[in-house]
Image: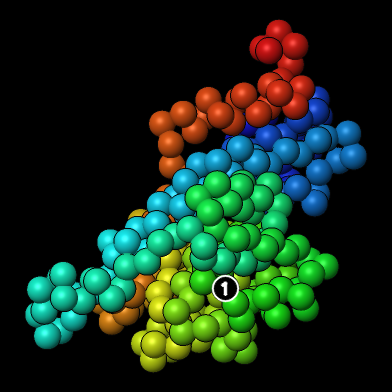
Amino acid sequence: MITWHFRAEWYAHAPRLEVLATPAAGRELVAWRAAPENVKVHFGAFHGEIIAESVLAYCMGWARGFFRPVPASGMWPREWLGGCCFMLEGTKAVIAGYGKIGKAIGRRLEASGVGVRGFGRSGIAQMEETMREADWFIMALPGDTGTDGFLDARRLALLKPSCVVVNIGRGNAIDEDALAAALSSGRIAAAYLDVFRDEPTQLAAAAGCTGLASDKARAALPTLTAMPHSSAFAPDYIARCFKELHDEGLLPSRQR
């Protein structure tokens, strides 16, 4: 079965199930912990190369002045952009969450001359020391492994004022109030968020999004670039999903 959603009680209705696969990298929508021992649960890991391009595009765009808010003084762009733009090559990125997606981001940034340090669960203390030198703090953390509020006020205070926060993992990993305060005060330079604590889905929009996903927050924080969970969009998304399943031998032989 290839699906986006699977509830724990559905296993009882699928006694012949051997492989449960989802294109998603996140584990929130599939009851994988309830899977019987004979069922292999597979989460998509093909997103890395797509997401890496999204991260690279933003970092390059910020470095070249594409996402800079226009000063209230109404200065001609050449007057203020000249002091903002810099070369991406030679900057430093720290990636929190160095699994398949995090490593794909690292490879793409390194190819553009960015120095990359990636950290998993065992390197958090070392990560905090390295954060002080980061030009880009990139988060590729899952949402179901104790990551709530990972980037809080204390860790934000470790970043230098020119640092940019990028989150393409899960929105729960950021203390949004602390991040908003850091952005509004100039404690950090900017943030690129593809995910939020309150995802701006159609249902949430109808009810009125809160936090950094809201229109009010985006209007008040001109250095916040908010995207609608779109960093993995690609025209061949499903083809990449099936190729991964094929390459890992998860499709029935007659479909390979």
Question: Which residue occupies the extreme right position in the image?
Answer: 37
Provide residue 83's location: percent of width, then percent of height. 28, 76
Q: Please give left or right for residue 54 compared with residue 256 in the image.
A: left
Provide residue 124's location: percent of width, then percent of height. 76, 74
Provide residue 256's location: percent of width, then percent of height. 68, 12
Is 78 located above or below residue 116 in the figure? below
Is 88 located above or below residue 14 in the figure? below
Is 8 located above or below residue 196 in the figure? above
Residue in view at x 81 percent, y 43 percent: 35
Residue 224: quarter of image? bottom left
User: Is 253 in front, or is 157?
Assistant: 157
- Can you identify the residue that label 1 sits on? 134
Q: Please give left or right for residue 109 compared with residue 74 in the image.
A: right
Instruction: State how the image is colored.
Output: rainbow
Residue in view at x 69 percent, y 61 percent: 118
User: Is 115 in front, or is 56?
Assistant: 115
